[in-house]
Amino acid sequence: MIEKTYQPAEIEGRIAQAWEAEGAFKAGRPDRRDAAPYAIVIPPPNVTGSLHMGHALNNTLQDILCRFERMRGRDVLWQPGTDHAGIATQMVVERQLMERKEPGRRDMGREKFLERVWQWKAESGGIIINQLKRLGASCDWSRERFTMDEGLSRAVIKVFVQLHREGLIYKAKRLVNWDPKLLTAISDLEVQQVEVKGNLWHLRYPLEGVSFDPNDPSTFIVVATTRPETMLGDTAVAVNPEDERYTHLVGRHVILPLVGRRIPIVADDYSDPEKGSGAVKITPAHDFNDFEVGRRHSLPQISVLDIEAKLSLADNSAYLHGLPEGAREFAEELEGMERFAARKLIVARLEEFGFLEKIEPNTHMVPHGDRSGVVIEPFLTDQWYVDAATLAQPAIAAVRNGDTTFVPKNWEKTYFEWMENIQPWCISRQLWWGHQIPAWYGPDGKVFVAETEEEAVGNALGYYVEQEVLTPEQAHDMAEDPAKREGFITRDEDVLDTWFSSALWPFSTLGWPDDDTDVKRYYPTNVLVTGFDIIFFWVARMMMMGLHFMEDVPFPTVYIHALVRDEKGAKMSKSKGNVIDPLHLIDEYGADALRFTLTAMAAQGRDIKLATSRVEGYRNFATKLWNACRFAEMNQCALPDGFDPTAAKQTLNRWIAHETVRAVREVTEAIEAYRFNDAAGAAYRFVWNVYCDWYLELAKPVLTGEDGEAKAETRAMVAWARDEILKLLHPFMPFITEELWAVTAKRDGLLTLEPWSRKAELSAEVFASPVLTDPMVPPVILQPEHEPEFSDPAAEAEIGWVVDLVTAIRSVRAEMNITPATLTPLVLAGASPETRERAARWSDVIKRLARLGEISFADAAPQGAVQLLVRGEVAALPLKGVIDLAAEKARLDKELGKAEADIKRVDAKLSNEKFVANAPEEIVEEEKEKREAAVARKEKILEALERLSNAG
RNA sequence: GGGCGCGUAGCUCAGCGGGAGAGCACCUCGUUGACAUCGAGGGGGUCACAGGUUCGAUCCCUGUCGCGCCCA
């Protein structure tokens, strides 16, 4: 029995359990051994994360694809899991320690701290996994993976060592984005540019060899800077080579104020003559652009900050080198000063000595750490890098030659843009939580990279024996006893960027490198579904690593979906307070309604501005479905064994079979093309506007009428179409459909494993699958050529007539303010034999739906009747005395006007020789037909008007 | 500054060479046993603006204005 009201909260948990108990989402189910695989790896959410709208959309779409393909018989693997989120997780645990007033990370030491992180992970990590389950994600949860898993860690180490061996990973001293609060390098993508109202300080740098006079511009050059404190590290002033104001100064030197360093004036395109004074100070160790300028002109790199972004000058030989007497005192005065305090002091000091020309307010972008929120410091350090430019080449080629395609296509441009300008990827992080880099150092700093400590130590000891740093005996002792080699061989303390492990996700989760059974079956996966902001995080890196290690793209298709914004179009963010929590929406409207809303709005190439009213609307849709199923149940609609919808005799039943087949086709083709919104729209219209509004309404007289063949057939058809609907909607609304599937009939199994009504056509993709060429994998059982789909235009025409007639009568009744209680007679004027038959067959229904009394026939409409045109014939409502003749005349006049306008427009076209000559034939034909129809309509309206005036 | 995208009904959005659609909101009517989380009907749009291409432009091209995002 179906419950009276639809309460999503009541059914969703129970249904989730049923899927779990059945192992419905397990990949490699025995019954699907021979099926073609279909694999998606989830873009691994952050283990500290919780479900936001972006996740909800992302996973809803993946789930639709997975459920759809599962129902189409494929062996679906939707691989779930989370990434370890180095910084975020470390911060969470550190905050927890602080809250609990426990010793901090550094106090407890690395090993202890890592224990605590694992403990945290066990207790509260992965909340998001449960939230994904609430959304209905049909992942194979038994295969959940974590980037810090043993297996995945082995993959990471293996990849690191191999890339290092191939020269694609190296250590270098370069500028990195340094987070002075978290004390680690972070990636470009973790840096957010924030608009800040700052200043542009114009500084006077005195020219060498002349005596500085603040009032004489020929004795100095003005440089403009947003970061005056970095002047301490300046090693040049750059001017544009084209800038005539300065050409005479190129090659000369300035004496850095306060510091006394002698630095050159160089010509470089980087300096923009339009900006500031046209001359810029160059600080290669503290600015990315300056770093490049410095390289071009072989300038020294002088770092003046420490890891906490405090001034570090006193023992800084690079800074002190070549400075005059007294420089040390200044250095000591500033030593240890925080960067912004130092800015103040330096500006004051510059002003005091006349070096400050002016301060100009200036709004500019300042990099901030997205985790720490502090200003990021470009900082010169030793880090490990991946030679991304080299790895990117095959990844670029794969998209160029179509091995991987983006949907929608325009994102390929973004991908190329980024890949072609890719910088060396800094992969080391000064954190504890993550994959520790498998590199060991000897006492002279020589690095030994190996998969195991044993191997690295062996190599190192061998080397030092050879170098006669150690005796073989010493080496032997050290090899035996880790305590003995302590202080001699040390492991790199840093860990790898989380994205390094994520890049391996499409194959590391399948068991590589330990076991390649699943790699063979499921790699490459079928599609990656993600947001555009993640193209660089995941897509690019997965492509690079997949191609390098698997020698094949990780996925042939990348579907890029929209960003979910608030209803005004602003990006949702905690700081703006405009976040809509998907879990709240699930609580209020149900997961199905949320999913359907996101799907219906997921048009390609456009962001989703989410209004909760839309969610409410689709919850109502779910309720409608629920009640339609109740209606079927109350009328004892059940599907007899062996029922063949195409053999139905009743026109109405043939009609709904026709419409159902069409809807299934529309939905199927839309999902296949990743047109999710079209798929949802087609399903919605069919269920509500066709099945509920018309089929069930038209079926009511039969269902409540006498028992007999017609009734039996209709009951069966109502049930058949309902089952088709449940299948059709299941990928979008899995919970309610599964529940209704269970309660509407005795079933052999879960809906989620039920076959989709329209089978997959043999696509090129399936053929191209390497699985098919693998002798170890049994061939896919191909669906036989399916028969031409069922279609019945005659039924469509008949029911179409009924629908049009009822609609027209309802409309005019409403316009005439005829109360529903008033039953009006209907006269079909000059009806064809076909219309007479139809009217006889449908009289009950028409009477009920259009609030009619008797239906009769006549050669012409009675006088003083409202005359309607339905499919070219006149339907008259004799309402003498009831209708307002003037109003009816006005109505007909309006109709006449419309018809005449149509004729005029078409005539204009048809009389245009160029149109007839150039337009496609079928368009011209169409126009001619339109004209004929409009002319016929006009005649009928004129007749009607005449009859009306006679009545008056 | 470079790139991408968007301006369609009051709102949120589809559509995209042959006289524009949905959901919500609004107005009118409705307790006919699936459903008021509903039903019936209705109003409402020079498809941002200006040029161009075309027999024909909301749709293609160019420009302008407005808005958003990404990168520098």
Image: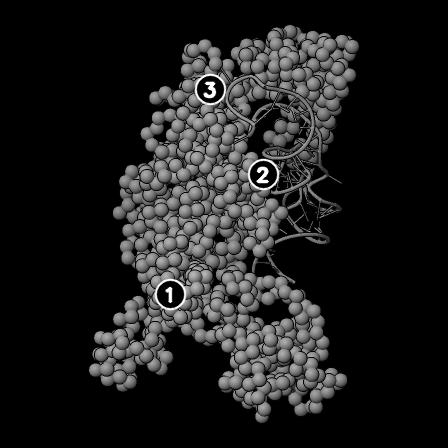
**Identity of the residue drawn at 54% across and 68% down:** A376
Percent across and percent down for residue B41 are: 65, 24
Point out the tag, 3 or 1, that comes first from the N-terminus: 1
Whole-angstrom CA distance, mark 1 to mark 2, is 47 Å
The quarter of the picture where residue A567 lies is top right
Relative to A165, say whether A510 is above or below. Answer: above
- For numbered disc 3, what is the local secondary structure? helix
- For numbered disc 1, what is the local secondary structure? helix
Percent across and percent down for residue A229 are: 60, 77
Depth check, mark 3 against mark 2: the one in front is 2
In what quadrant of the picture does the N terminus of chain A appear? top left
Q: Which residue is mark 1?
A: A113
Q: Hey, what amino acid is under mark 3?
A: Asn
Percent across and percent down for residue B25 are: 64, 34
Depth check, mark 3 against mark 1: the one in front is 1
Can residue A717 be spotted in the picture? no
Q: Hey, what amino acid is under mark 1?
A: Phe
Query: Disc 3 vs disc 2: Cβ atoms closer than 8 Å?
Result: no
- For numbered disc 2, what is the local secondary structure? helix
- In which chain is the residue bearing label 3? A
Q: Hey, what amino acid is under mark 2?
A: Ser
Q: Which residue is mark 2?
A: A613
Q: Would you call the spot at circle 3 few (<14 residues within 10 Å), some (14-19), or many (20 or more)?
A: many
- In which chain is the residue bearing label 2? A
Q: Which residue is mark 3?
A: A653
Mark on residue A99? none
Q: Nearer the viewer, residue A423 or A7?
A: A7
Q: Nearer the viewer, residue A102 or A890?
A: A102
Point out the tag, 3 or 2, that comes first from the N-terminus: 2
